[in-house]
Amino acid sequence: MATNKRRNKKKGSCSCPICDDLIEDETQQSIFCEGICNTWLHRCCAGLSKAAFSGLEGSAEKFYCPHCRLQDQAVEISSLKEALASLQRDVAALQDLQTTGNQSVASSPEEPVLSNPRGPLPSTRPRHPSNTGSDRKFNLIVSGIEECASGTTRRDRLSHDNEKLSSLLTSLLPNFSEQSVRDCSRLGRYSSDRTRPLLVVLNRSCDVTTVLSNKSSLANRPNIKVNRDLPPSLRKTRSVLLTQRRHLISSGIDRSNIKIGKSELYVNGRKHGSVVGQEYKLARTQSEPLTNSTPNTPSTFSSTQSDIDRAPADVQESS
Ligand SMILES: [Zn+2]
Ligand SMILES: [Zn+2]
C-alpha cells in the first residue's frame, strides 16, 4: 500500500526540495511525493493542512505535490494540443473530400462517384437545407433497422448501422460494395420507444432504382421498409396513391397488376387515375371494364417508368 510505501521509505538525511531545509523526522510531519519530486516534502511545503495530512495517511491514494500536479497538467495539455491539431487536420481532409464530392455532383449530376477508400463517412452534418429534389434521387429511406440503445458510443452506433445496412443492401443490390454507400444517418431525435428511419445516400442513382425494384425480396422481413426519399411536396400525393392502391387490392385486384407512377396509378398497364389537388381523380377511360383493357402501355407510362416501384401496401407515409 502507498501509505506503507511512504512509511517504509528511508528518509535518511532528507532535505525538502521546496524549502531546502532538512526534514526532522522527530519533530516535523512529511509526505512522499510520487510525482517528479519522488522525494519527501514537509507537510506544510506540500500545501497540506493537518487534517488533510492525517486523511492521506490512512488512504491508499498516491500523493502528488502541487508542483507535480501542475507538471502533470502541462503534459496533459500538450498531449491535448497534439490531439486537437490532429483533429483539425482530419476536419480539413474531410472538408476537402466534401468539396470534391460537391464538385463531382455539379459536373456530373447523374453519377457523382465519391472515391473513399475507408468506406462510408460517418455522418456529421445535418442535411443541407438547400437539398434539392435532384439530390434526393441518391437517397433511400430505410425503416425498421433496429437501433442501438441509448448510451452506446457514437462510433459503435455508426458501425452497427453500417453493418446492418450493408447486409440489407447485399440482398438488394447485386453489385453492392462499400463504395455504394456515401452516407448513412438516423433521421430525427433519439427516442427509446421507436426506431428511427435511416437516411441512406448512395453514390449512384441507378443503384437507388435497382434497390427499389428488388425490394419485393424483402417479403420475408416485413419490418424492413425501403422507400424513395420523397420531397415533402410529393409525400401527400404518394400517400393518396398508396391509399387508393390499398382500396384496389381489397376490391380484388392483384397487387402485381397495380403500378404507382409519380402522381398516377396504373392498373394492367392502363391509367386508372391520378392525384389532382391532393385528391384521387379517376381517369376518363375508367368507364371501360378493366378486363377489356388493352395490354399496350400508355405513352405516359414509359416517361414515369423510373418512378415505378412496388411499395408494400402497409407503407405509412407522412405528409
Ligand atoms: Zn520544506
Ligand atoms: Zn512533487
Image (tube, rainbow, N blue to C red):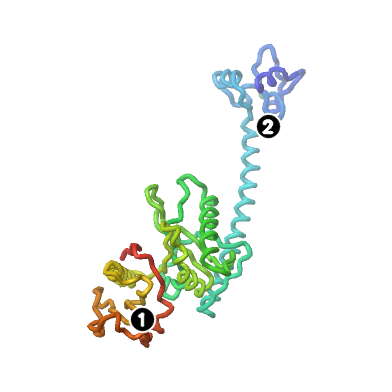
Q: How crowded is the residue under tag 2: few (<14 C-alpha within 10 Å), some, or many (20+)?
A: some
Quadrant of res 301: bottom left
* Disc 1 secondary structure class: loop
Q: Earlier in the sequence, mark 2 or mark 1?
A: 2
Q: Nearer the viewer, residue 252 or 180?
A: 252
Residue 236 seen in this snapshot: no
Identify which residue is drawn at 59% across, 21% down: 59
- Is 220 placed above or below 255 here? above
Q: Is residue 94 left or right of residue 285?
A: right
Q: Residue furthest right?
A: 12
- Is 88 placed above or below 41 here? below
User: Where, quadrant-wise, is the N terminus in this rendering?
Assistant: top right
Q: What type is the residue that disc 2 sits on?
A: Gly
- Mark number for residue 269? 1
Identify which residue is drawn at 46% across, 55% down: 145
Q: Is residue 123 left or right of residue 276?
A: right
Beta carbon at label 2 within 8 Å of ligand 2: yes
**Does the CB distance between marks 2 and 1 fall below 8 Å?**
no
Picture coordinates of residue 6, whole percent (x, y) = 68, 21
Q: Is residue 124 left or right of residue 315?
A: right
Identify which residue is drawn at 42% across, 69% down: 228
- Is 257 placed above or below 95 here? below
Q: Residue furthest top?
A: 26
Q: What type is the residue that disc 1 sits on?
A: Gly
User: Where, quadrant-wise, is the C terminus in this rendering?
Assistant: bottom left
Picture coordinates of residue 132, whole percent (x, y) = 41, 73
- Mark number for residue 35? 2
